[in-house]
Amino acid sequence: MSDNDTKKPTGDAQPPPKGAPTDSPAAKTGPEPSNPPAGAKLDNPPAAASGPTGTPPPKPPSGPPPKPAPKNPGFITATIDGKEVVVKPGTNMIEAAKAVGSDIPYYCYHPRLSIAANCRICLIEASNAPKMVPACQTPMAEGQVVKTTTPKVKEQQRAVMEFLLLNHPVDCSICDQAGECKLQDYYMKYDYRPSRLEGTKALKNKRKVLGPRVVIDQERCIMCTRCVRVMNEVAKEPQLGVFGRGSHERIDVFPGSELSSNYSLNTVDVCPVGALLSRDFRFKARAWFLSATPSVCTGCSRGCTTYVDWMSQDSYRYRPRENEAVNKSWMCDEGRLTYKYLNVGRVLQAQVGRRASRSGEAEPVTSRKEAVQAAAKALRPLTGGKQLAVLASPLASNEDLLAGLSFAKVTLGVSTVYVGGRPSGAADHFLMTADKNPNRKGLELIAKGLGLKLETFDALSTALKAGTVKGLYAIGTEVPGNVESFAQATGQLDVFVAQAFSESPITAQATVLLPAAVPVEDEGSFVQQDGIIQRFRKAYPPKGDVLPGWKWVAELTRELGGESPAWSHARDVWRELAGKVAEFAEFNWEKASPADREKPGINPLPAGADGRPAGYREFGTPRVRGI
């Protein structure tokens, strides 16, 4: 049919344009009109359909719903146990829970190691997961709701503890880890039920020596694999592995090898139970008898941040303390064992006269005052002359060096200081440095600030052999050369006044010997090789006649007629003299002081658990128990 044969529309309705949708308003007003002739012009052409009724509705997007916009852009905002937490993206649930005071237990997790997620005690409930998820392995998500205290979570924690304890020997009474063991702590908190095991437990090696410094009790091991990851990822020396299957699985060294790394004792630190033990510390002291004080390792110029664990004025071990800028969570074995000089071979009594010349005779011991008077009398004729030399050790603290070198310049009148200290040794690929002195950088900065010239120890040896030096004042008697030959050279001196903390052939030649305090017996600071200044705290009072080096300096200044400094504490030395060293200007001595007691782990007890009265452990007479 042609366009002319179409029927005329009835009524006043206008025909819609060709192609208009049939559900448009124009289509509903009458029958379908014929199309206008080609080329015809319409007086009032209809408007194109628009609006929501003129277009088909959009189809909903396929897939999961879009993620909600972050409440705090750049951060993750979630809820843990009803408390809102804002953390960085990628933060796992354990670290996020700590921010709001929720404690999620864990064994295999360590913030500086890769995630293993094999102990399963950290399983918790999350709103975006149908099952419980390991908190150590799961990062926080925007809007997530995490619950760590529900009955389901608590039952899971109890079940994991029961499983871990099934084959555990439970020999806590003889275990060195007792008192600082996470298995004990979590049993009391999450399990506290008797074992339901029927039959015998799986037996393994109880005392296997893995290397020169570490022994393992394989029956106590819970297979967290922290030790394996430490050796693989931190020390870069994969000397440990997991052997066997099922209940016979064990941590061991590879056949024909041993755990000989200089970082092997870090495996003892990270072990949450009493499986890996230090052969040096084993059976020496109970953890609950020890007090912990923040200190600095004196083994090398790295200056690892440490805790010193002590009891009755004796130090028992060093442990690493968290410091992101220096040693993170780690420490080398060689540095750990340097604590022994704090206890053994100490100079404890002031003495006048050479001991080497009195072989076989009783050594006369004098009082502090008599020793200071004798030292001042011997030094007085040499002050201001070129026959008096000063030896400074980079083992001394900044406070001792500030006082000692100021005394050397102002009172003794010297312009050159000779540098002593320990000889160089081996370095390794991680923390240990070749310089075995903790404060060489501090000595250099202080000498520069005071306008003193530093000379090598070899230059002093040459001067002693040439006879140009008749008197020597030593701040520390450690020397980098041959000890015996230097002792013979100092034996020819008319005057040799030495502040020392360790006995040696050199101290035997001193005409006046002044016992000096070690770092754990006084407050102070060191400057490690990268220029970082670190504070250490006083652990216990000095033994015998021991005084800090700066206090001996104050006494000598008074006896020599100088202006007596009013120092009653190491902070007074710093406040008065540190301003002369430009590099010390921005260091706040008080604010940089770490807390004097460790909160988690080992703590000094307020009352004597071993029968001693309250406070006697921290400030009492040494060696009262024969330890």
Image (tube, rainbow, N blue to C red):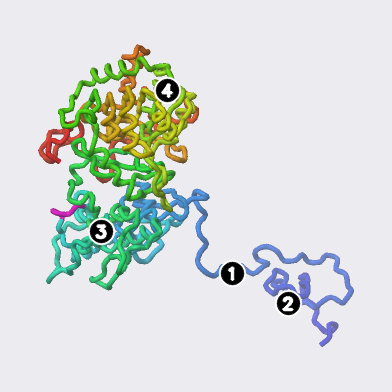
Q: Which residue is labeled 2 in the image?
A: 31
- Mark 4: amino acid: Leu
Q: Real-space Cα distance between discs 3 and 4? A: 58 Å
Range covered by the magenta-colored residues = 172-176
Q: Is residue 269 above or below residue 206?
A: above
Q: Residue at the spot x=42%, y=56% of the render?
A: 140
Q: Residue at x 31, y 51 (%)?
A: 103
Label 1 sits on residue = 59
**Quadrant in which the C terminus is drawn:** top left
Kindly report the distance in space between the C-alpha atoms of the residues bearing marks 4 and 1: 78 Å
Q: Which residue is mark 3?
A: 154
Q: Nearer the viewer, mark 4 or mark 1?
A: 4
Residue 600 falls in image quadrant = top left
Q: Mark 1 belongs to which amino acid?
A: Lys
Give the amino acid at mark 3.
Lys
Contact between labelled residues 2 and 4, with CB atoms less than 8 Å apart = no
* Marks 3, 1: nearer the viewer: 3
